[in-house]
Image (tube, rainbow, N blue to C red):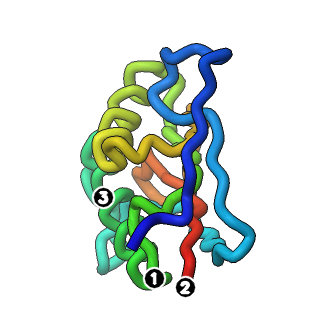
Amino acid sequence: MNSAVQLIRSADLSDRAQYAYAATAPKDARFIFLAGSCPLNLDGSTAAIGDFAGQAAKCIENLEIALAEAGASMRDVISTRVLVASARQEDLVTAWDVVAAAFGDHDVPSTLLGVTVLGYDDQLVEIEATAAVRD
């Protein structure tokens, strides 16, 4: 099935960004608003303590599960917000590299933020997403 999401690029904006600047979905699409995907194991413990890349990977894994439960996949994501509990740009980039690799050529519009703290003990990364599908 083809994704309902259309990524938009512009020759009038820098190509330095590693993602599309905008995305649309048709009026007959069903939107899926996902809670922030956290690096939590099934038992509620935090995965990959102290590891930005490991936590980003666990967030992606959990995001894929939530998407599947809603009848969607990574190719149906229309935007993301990646939160990283760090003031160091290199930590943000470490998490971002994992996220970007997971999306591959479906490089959805994204925002990458450094934040002071996240909600769970030892949590370093959280990924919010919105998806759109045609039923």
Judging depth in this view, the residue of 13 and 117 nearest the camera is 13
Q: Are marks 1 and 2 in contact (CB under 8 Å)?
A: yes
Q: Is residue 89 visible?
A: yes
Q: Position of residue 127 (x, y in %)?
A: 50, 53
Residue type marked 1: Gly
In the picture provided, is 16 more to the left or to the right than 23?
left
Q: Which residue is mark 2?
A: 135
Q: Earlier in the sequence, mark 3 or mark 2?
A: 3
Q: CA distance from mark 1 to mark 2?
A: 9 Å
For mark 2, give the secondary structure.
loop
Q: Position of residue 112 (x, y in %)?
A: 55, 35
Please, is residue 66 above or below residue 69 in the view? Answer: above
User: Who's the residue at 30% across and 49% down the image?
Assistant: 102
Q: Earlier in the sequence, mark 1 or mark 2?
A: 1
Q: CA distance from mark 3 to mark 2?
A: 28 Å
Please, is residue 69 above or below residue 121 in the view? Answer: below
Residue type marked 2: Asp
User: Who's the residue at 41% across and 60% down the image?
Assistant: 75
Q: Are marks 3 and 2 in contact (CB under 8 Å)?
A: no
- In the picture, the quarter occupied by the C terminus is bottom right
Q: Position of residue 49 (x, y in %)?
A: 29, 49
Q: Determine crowd level at label 2: few under 14, some 14-19, many 20+ residues with C-alpha closer than 10 A.
A: few
User: Who's the residue at 39% across and 79% down the image?
Assistant: 68
Q: CA distance from mark 3 to mark 1?
A: 20 Å
Q: Which residue is mark 1?
A: 71
Which mark's residue is nearer the viewer, 1 or 2?
2
